[in-house]
Image (spheres, rainbow, N blue to C red):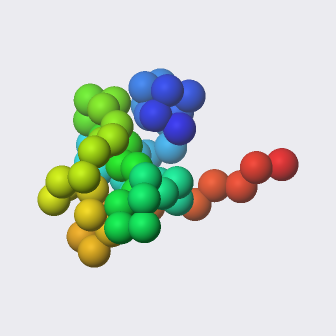
Amino acid sequence: MYRNLALKSLGNFKGNNYLSSSENNANTAWIQNFSDGEQATRWDNNNNKSISYLVRAIRQF
């Protein structure tokens, strides 16, 4: 969504972190930063599942 929509100014994304449904482990999930495109890939306070993040529901057809 970042590459296909946000970079083209489509989808009305905010320049924040969005939580992914893909887990990193039992306590963390992947985070996509929509301001710079970075993805969180490590355990730290920025990608802990107990912190609230924006989400965007998607559906694959």
Question: Residue 35: percent from the left, percent from the top?
Answer: 26, 35
The residue furthest bottom is: 50
User: Toward the viewer: 17 or 9?
Assistant: 17
Query: Quadrant of the rendered structure where residue 25 is?
Result: bottom left
Q: Determine whether, in the image, residue 57 is placed left or right of residue 49.
A: right
Query: Quadrant of the rendered structure where residue 57 is?
Result: bottom right
User: Toward the viewer: 11 or 44?
Assistant: 44
Q: Residue at x 18, y 54 (%)?
A: 44
The residue furthest left is: 45
Question: Residue 58: percent from the left, percent from the top?
Answer: 63, 55
Identify whether 16 is placed above or below 51.
above
Let me know if residue 46 appears in the view: yes
Question: Residue 23: percent from the left, percent from the top?
Answer: 48, 57
Identify whether 6 is placed above or below 27.
above
Question: Residue 24: percent from the left, percent from the top?
Answer: 43, 53
Q: Determine whether, in the image, residue 30 is placed left or right of residue 35.
A: right
Q: Determine whether, in the image, residue 9 is placed left or right of residue 41.
A: right
Query: Quadrant of the rendered structure where residue 19 is?
Result: bottom left
Let me know if residue 52 appears in the view: no
Q: Which residue is drawn at 25% across and 52% down?
A: 43
